[in-house]
Amino acid sequence: MSRRRIDIAKPKFGDEEWQALRGPLESGWLTQGPEVSAFEQDFAKRHEVGHALATTSCTTALHLALAALDIGPGDEVIVPAFTWVATANVILYCGATPVFVDVDRDTFNLDVSQIAQKVTKRTKAVIPVHLFGLCADMDGLRAVLPDTVAVVEDAACAAGASYKGRPAGGFGDFAAFSFHPRKSITTGEGGMLTTTDDDLAAKAEILRNHGASISEEQRHYGPQPYILPDFNLLGFNYRMSDLQGAVGRVQLGRLDGFIAERERWSGFYDEAFADIPWIRSPARPEAGQHAWQAYVTYIDPAQAPKPRNEIMQILHENGIATRPGTHGVHMLGYFRDKYGFSPDDFPAARDCERNSMALPLHNQMSQEDYEFVVSAIRSL
Ligand SMILES: *Cc1c(COP(=O)(O)O)cnc(C)c1O
């Protein structure tokens, strides 16, 4: 076999991103401004929501959502135990308590049948995660929740995903997307908060900008230079820069093309592994679009020829990058020490951390790259 190096993920840019950066660099308006506004409008339109607010990351978008919902000490927020650590961290930023629920091993998403037993009088919100780009069971979730409990989608991996024909981003009170380079489209760092609720959008917008009652832009272009904003809320600086907004607009225009290409190659993987009993391909939505942020398989330890870590090591030696899907958050030191969790408290999350394996899937891979991955796995 020829030598190759295949990354787990790699962003893709073209000349348009370079050109887009000229506008803000020439005008000198670098912080949140016209490029961010245009990016927000395009994003809201694509995801069929009334409001989109660009942020510095998905993590800060999630934090803004919880702050706008007035979540604080004494409140409980339900999260899946198998997710990126930020989903749980933002709850602690608010002084509230994360309540973990185990996941479904087949979809890697929240097991909604375990939600009802976790809901208490203190439950203020649930953060379902659309992990790796597959939407969580949003109807199943809503059906087991009291109306008073808010829903905040962690849509970090789900730009362009849909569920029962509707795009991610409008299923709850808020949704938060990520533009980290590991996601399908990127602005370096960056995020987007979406909502269909006018009042929540207005509040989140104020909280994003230090709690200021009017924005820098309004102040800059406004007719009354003596006006200082009032600050009636404890806010943050979670604004995206216009350089990022300019890149984000171009990347958003590429999103559907990126997903279509990933969809095609994920199908190629599915077919190639169909007759290998120890490797399970990712679940696909019954009605909707997987966003294919990642192609995450499950290695059945009872049938696999070697332990998962050994498989990952061999692939690594062949130049093929793989990663465990994500973490059992209850097994991470901070959460384990704070709450005294053992791995067995959330057995599916434990197994998903130990047995999941993401394969390379991105928009800089050639047919030869995909064939190389498949033959390396088949020769195990
Ligand atoms: C990447 C990711 C995040 C964090 O996104 P950032 O933009 O890096 O803050 C949160 N949740 C999930 C599920 C993620 O995959």
Image: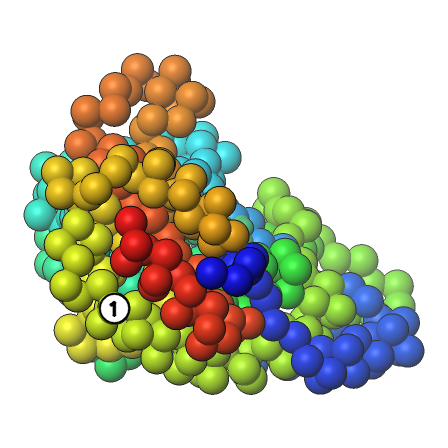
State left or right for residue 85 relative to residue 98: right
Q: Is residue 14 in view from this perspective?
A: yes
The quarter of the picture where residue 88 lies is top left
Q: What's the residue at 42%, 21% (across, down)?
A: 333
Residue 321 higher or lower than 288, as above or below: above
Q: What's the residue at 52%, 62% (across, down)?
A: 2
Count of labels shown? Answer: 1
Amino acid type of the residue that numbered disc 1 sits on in the rendered structure: Ala
Q: Is residue 123 in view from this perspective?
A: no
Residue 29 higher or lower than 132, as above or below: below
Q: Position of residue 203 (x, y in %)?
A: 52, 59
Q: Position of residue 175 (x, y in %)?
A: 40, 61
Q: What's the residue at 36%, 74% (across, down)?
A: 265
Mark 1 residue CB less than 8 A from any atom of ligand 1 = no
- Secondary structure type for disc 1: helix
Q: Position of residue 282 (x, y in %)?
A: 24, 60
State left or right for residue 327 relative to residue 17: left
Q: Which of 251 and 230 lies nearest the eye of the viewer?
A: 251
- Residue identified by numbered label 1: 272
Q: Position of residue 317 (x, y in %)?
A: 49, 45
Q: Residues within 10 Å of mark 1 (few under 14, many from 20)?
A: some
Q: Which of 338 and 4 lies nearest the eye of the viewer?
A: 4
Q: What's the residue at 19%, 43% (across, down)?
A: 304
